[in-house]
Amino acid sequence: MHLSRFPRVFLAHLPTPLEKLDRLSKELGGPEIWIKRDDCTGLSTGGNKTRKLEFLMAEALALGADIVMTQGATQSNHARQTAAFAAKLGMDCHILLEDRTGSNDANYNSNGNVLLDRLHGATISKRAGGMDMQAEMEMVANKLRAEGRLVYVIPGGGSNATGALGYVNCAFELVSQANDRGMVIDHLVTATGSAGTQAGLITGLKAINAGIPLTGIGVRAPKQKQEENVYNLALQTAKKLGCPDVVSRSDVVADSDYVGSGYGIPREDTLEAIRMFAQLEAILLDPVYSGKGAAGLIDYCRKGKFKKGERVVFLHTGGSAALFGHDAFFAGDSKALAAE
Ligand SMILES: *Cc1c(COP(=O)(O)O)cnc(C)c1O
């Protein structure tokens, strides 16, 4: 498998660390839990979009684009990382933000990722929740084209076959790290949203016959829909790589039982997962993606789905910048010192 055939801008801090979570493993009393630190990819506080953007932005450069556009929810990590990457390459960046949650919270609407979008110099326009954001992007892109701009449009989450190459590469990187230390991985778990991360991972794992089952913990769509999205993108990714038959439908497993009432709305177990990772391992999760992914991981350990003696790797997809747009969820968390 020869990823060097595809244009890429090398910017991520790779390989990301693979670390053992001793205190969390002990607390849960089940499998040995490890973490793949894709929250440490670099680029404006890191996260999983850096790997995808290495391939997407290289394509934008190759096409001679002078402006990139993308879209996401108000606290989109993908929008923030796209704005940062564009700044690094000296390109303009325009972002459409969809108000998916209807929140009036001041920090939600202007702190966290939104603050960083602005700092990186992106222009932002807003849309009401439920609009066809891809169509909205095309409309704006066509206006810019009429003005003579060369626009490169990146889909939400950077999730197409080009972006997914970043996670094919992550699968290779993870297996190589495991091989180098004689470590057997029994399960891999990650949050799954716009599907590029899971689709790239499963394509990479299957292409090298790694034999590591992957579970995506959903953050929005119901199980069936999520699995179809991931599978379809995995097929396109495998085709792009020249190995069209490596992924079967049964390789794609998503669990949407931890979504709760909707995208961006945390459940109690999402917040518990965020607190546990922060207090046991000093690792920051977020309430939209990695907190839900970790809630699934923790529940699987508690229910014995992952057994004692097994080794589970949680791929940390990032998102900590969004914490500063969601501080209201933790408003009651302050502890007092008993002696005072
Ligand atoms: C985008 C994102 C995800 C989901 O990845 P997809 O490739 O969209 O499925 C997970 N975690 C974080 C922090 C993200 O920003």
Image (cartoon, rainbow, N blue to C red):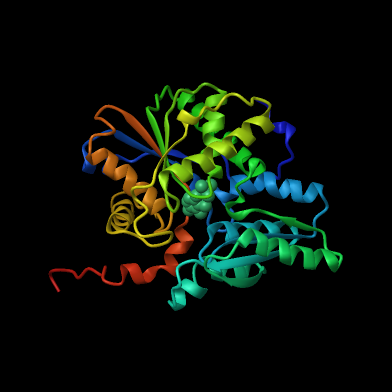
In the displayed structure, would residue 307 be above or below residue 85? above
Please state the total of marks drawn on the protein image. Answer: 0
In the displayed structure, would residue 53 be above or below residue 92? above
Dividing the image into 4 quarters, which one contains the N terminus?
top right
Residue closer to the observer: 249 or 79: 249
Q: Position of residue 113 (x, y in %)?
A: 53, 65
> Residue 13: which quarter of the image?
top right
Q: Is 176 placed left or right of 105 in the picture?
A: right
Q: Position of residue 277 (x, y in %)?
A: 33, 51
Q: Is residue 47 visible?
A: no
In the displayed structure, would residue 326 be above or below residue 316? below
Q: Is 308 placed left or right of 11 in the picture?
A: left
Q: Position of residue 328 (x, y in %)?
A: 35, 72
Residue closer to the observer: 318 or 109: 109
Q: Is residue 103 visible?
A: yes
Q: Residue at x 80, y 55 (%)?
A: 65
Q: Residue at x 53, y 43 (%)?
A: 229
Q: Position of residue 154 (x, y in %)?
A: 67, 54
Q: Residue furthest left?
A: 339
Dividing the image into 4 quarters, which one contains the C terminus?
bottom left
Q: Residue at x 41, y 51 (%)?
A: 290
Residue closer to the observer: 256 or 88: 256
Q: Residue at x 57, y 56 (%)?
A: 78
